[in-house]
Image (cartoon, helix red, strand yellow):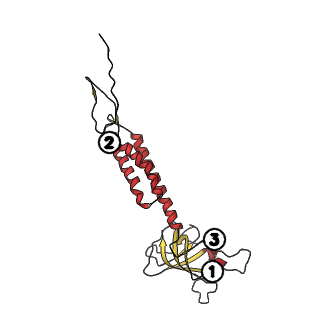
């Protein structure tokens, strides 16, 4: 009498077939292909840092991960790879969000063609010169096309806005701190037919800057800067 041992080579399978070795059936579990693909697309989601159009990569990774989780839970004796699917979904979501956050920052930071980028800091007068109402840069940019980033401050209406105030920090929409200087607030008037809705996050405004060191008609209610906006980015 002789004893023989037969080894069954493991290989991934797509269906739930049982592999036979002689008259003995193997009870191994196959790695779910959707879980592996979800992880691959999740890792590839880093490409969303480069362009908006590549958002399909994390979307595919999320869908494949969900399909894998569903199939593994329905047939846990046939399939493994649950943690691979979870990792694929997690990577897809995190890198998708990170990619869009970076692209949004770049989009807001880069001025449109033909507009000079400026900041609220550049519009502040010299603190050592109490006679100076506006900065030298503001004087240089008067009646020029500029691009300025900031936060919206509005009144009762939040939709279909044709005018709002742009401030240098998020603050509160309910009020503007009395300590805020007039140079830290810019009146924004949108050129027709442009309208916008209120948002609480940072936006970019492109338009013609007007500097009101003197305001004999009191058109600005004490403010010093106005932008007639051609474009609002958010």
Residue 223 seen in the current view = no
- Judging depth in this view, the residue of 199 and 45 nearest the camera is 45
| Residue sitting at the far top | 1
Distance from disc 1 to disc 3, alpha carbons, whole Å, reads: 15 Å
> Is 148 displayed left or right of 84 in the figure?
right
Mark 1 surroundings: few (<14), some (14-19) or many (≥20) residues within 10 A: few
Q: Label 3, secondary structure: give it.
A: helix
The quadrant the N terminus occupies is: top left
Which of labels 1 and 3 is toward the front?
1
Residue under label 2? 71
Residue under label 3? 121
Q: Earlier in the sequence, mark 1 or mark 3?
A: 3
Which quarter of the figure has residue 71? top left
In the displayed structure, 80 sits above or below 169; it is: above
Distance from disc 2 to disc 3, alpha carbons, whole Å, reads: 56 Å
> Is 193 displayed left or right of 141 in the figure?
left
Q: Label 1, secondary structure: give it.
A: helix
């Amino acid at each position: 009498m002789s004893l023989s041992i037969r080894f069954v080579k493991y290989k991934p399978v797509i269906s739930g077939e049982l592999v036979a070795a002689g008259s003995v059936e193997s009870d191994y579990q196959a790695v779910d292909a959707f879980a592996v693909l979800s992880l691959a697309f999740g890792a590839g989601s880093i490409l969303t840092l480069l362009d908006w159009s590549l958002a399909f990569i994390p979307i595919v990774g999320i869908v494949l991960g969900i399909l894998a989780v569903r199939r593994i839970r329905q047939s846990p004796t046939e399939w493994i790879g649950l943690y691979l699917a979870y990792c694929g979904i997690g990577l897809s979501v995190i890198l998708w969000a990170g990619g869009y956050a970076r692209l949004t920052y770049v989009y807001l930071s880069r001025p449109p063609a033909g507009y000079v980028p400026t900041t609220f800091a550049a519009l502040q007068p010299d603190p050592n010169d109490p006679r100076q109402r506006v900065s030298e840069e503001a004087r240089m940019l008067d009646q020029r096309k500029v691009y300025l980033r900031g936060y919206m401050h509005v009144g009762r209406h939040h939709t279909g806005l044709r005018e709002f105030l742009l401030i240098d920090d998020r603050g509160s929409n309910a009020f503007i701190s009395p300590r805020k200087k007039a140079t830290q607030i810019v009146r924004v008037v949108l050129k027709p037919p442009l309208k916008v809705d209120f948002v609480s996050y940072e936006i970019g405004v492109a338009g013609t800057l007007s500097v009101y060191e003197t305001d004999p008609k009191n058109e600005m209610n004490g403010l010093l800067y106005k932008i007639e906006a051609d474009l609002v980015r958010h």
